[in-house]
Image (spheres, coloured by chain):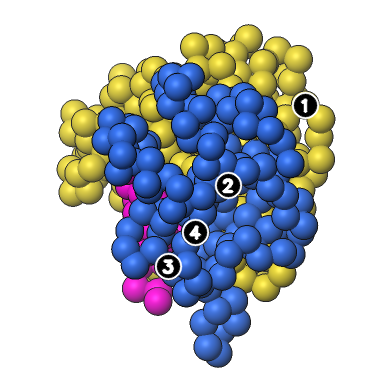
Amino acid sequence: MVDVVGLDELMKEHNFFDGFDKEALELMAGCARNESFRAGEYIFKSNSDATHFYIIRHGNVSVELPVPGRGRITLQTVGEHETLGWSWLVPPYRWWADAKAISLVRAISLDAVCLREKMEDDHELGYRLMQRFVPVLAERLHATTVQLLDLYGLPGRA
Amino acid sequence: MNVLAPNRTVGQDPMVPRSFVIERVRKELSDTYTMDLVPRDGLPFRFEPGQFNMLYVFGVGEVPISISGDSKVTAGISHTTRSVGKVSAALNALQPGDVVGVRGPYGAPWPVADVHGMDVVFVAGGVGLAPLRPAIYWVLAHRAEFGNVAIFYGARTPEDILFRREVQQWRGRFDMTVHVTVDRATGAWSGKVGVVTQLIKGGGFDRHNAVALVCGPEVMMRYAAEALGERGMPKQNIHVSMERNMKCAVGFCGHCQWGANFVCKDGPVFSYDRAEPLLSIWEL
Ligand SMILES: Cc1cc2nc3c(=O)[nH]c(=O)nc-3n(C[C@H](O)[C@H](O)[C@H](O)COP(=O)(O)OP(=O)(O)OC[C@H]3O[C@@H](n4cnc5c(N)ncnc54)[C@H](O)[C@@H]3O)c2cc1C
Ligand code: FES
């Protein structure tokens, strides 16, 4: 396992952490781990506890749901420099979809319980993290809306 | 006002079509076909990437369709058409040997000839890749004169990827990047799933020195232009291709009026600083 100082450096490389000072980064690095997942491996499964969120450093992840009669439906893919998972922020803190590594994935995972505690103790940090996550949520919502619009479909085609 | 199409001689009526024979028909997607046409008069046909023709299906009607082939080829032209209604479906039902009327080329082209030295970003959605293809050919034919070249392409499903073989070939080149995403994954698709704007966020171009050519459904073009703007690209460097119903295609009838513009004559390619105020209004 990479030591805390190394992680703090790795985190700095990701634009999600842009603007956080050294102290905040070190605080968050205390909740962080460097992880890797083989192609085909599940990073999390729907309905399980949302114990982490992930900053993808390398590779691609498919976020998917099993739909009876239709197999597994990929809702989106998450790639390098993107953030995977937001259910850790919203009670009851359970994943609502599966996340599977499409290729070898290297990621920084952040322990949700640890981070929620730190956010509770340090509201400034909590606010700054929320500021980062709201655009992620808005972007996902926006993307979902656009996908629902079925822009490339024919008028009247289901 | 000069309403003479470039391939016409003085005295020829711009409303009278030239007749072309369908040489080849390729099924691209379940509802989309590419037709290669050759002029019956044997005269060369010249156009610039981004221009369109009015294609006349005799006895049915006339539709504006962008030219989707290579502008260096003057012996014939290609059009890629999706069946959405009466005329486009009738066009796609035609066979090799059948004859169509062609008026054109019309409209303002993609500004590929004016952007040497810059990075070029193509953003295509669905069959919007067809009007961009001549510009892609042009840039690749003059590859050394441009900086980075990137294609961001979004399709409905993997089965709806237009010009699939060519997209794969472009993807295999070392001198350009090609990113494809689909709204809905099906079958064994292991590529990206999501909207085309997410691809733009990945960057790959110098925002101060890049031009973007965007073609697809209007809502997609608006979101794409916003995403490019968020990455710092000035609006005047973003170009979109507009579609409106047309009749004359030469600025006479007012059918294609869009704000103070006629799409047939002032467009279909507009820079985003001009298009933005009008983009959200369909019935202009
Ligand atoms: C400059 C220009 C370039 C174009 N280039 C191409 C091209 O390269 N390939 C191509 O397939 N089409 C292209 N189009 C669109 C094409 O002209 C229309 O799809 C065609 O005119 C529809 O005529 P129709 O009689 O088949 O359908 P209509 O009977 O006129 O329409 C049938 C249905 O299709 C809808 N519809 C009409 N136009 C469109 C559209 N553009 N997109 C989605 N739905 C539509 C209508 O709202 C209606 O519901 C272009 C349009 C313009 C203005
Ligand atoms: S189609 Fe007649 S003015 Fe444009």
Q: Amino acid at mark 2?
A: Ser
Above or below for A106 versus B157: above
- Name the residue carrying label 3: A94
Q: Is mark 1 within 8 Å of ligand 1?
A: no
Q: Which residues are magenta?
A: A134-158
Above or below for B72 versus A57: above
Say which label, 3 or 4, has the lower sequence index: 4
The one nearer the camera, B281 or A4, is: A4
Q: Amino acid at mark 3?
A: Arg
Q: Which chain is yellow?
A: B
Q: Colour of chain A?
A: blue
Question: CA separation, marks 3 and 2?
Answer: 16 Å
Q: Can residue B97 be seen from the camera position used here?
A: no
Pointer 1 and pointer 4 on the same chain = no
Residue A134 lies left or right of residue B228; in this view the side is: left
Above or below for A94 versus B225: below
Crowding near the residue tagged with mark 1, few <14, some 14–19, many ≥20 C-alpha atoms within 10 Å: some
Which chain is disc 1 placed on? B
The one nearer the camera, B240 or B259, is: B240
Residue B51: x, y in percent? 50, 34
Q: Amino acid at mark 1?
A: Asp
Crowding near the residue tagged with mark 2, few <14, some 14–19, many ≥20 C-alpha atoms within 10 Å: many
Task: State the residue at coordinates (77%, 57%).
Answer: A38
Q: Can residue A150 be seen from the camera position used here?
A: yes
Residue B87: x, y in percent? 43, 64
Pointer 3 and pointer 4 on the same chain = yes
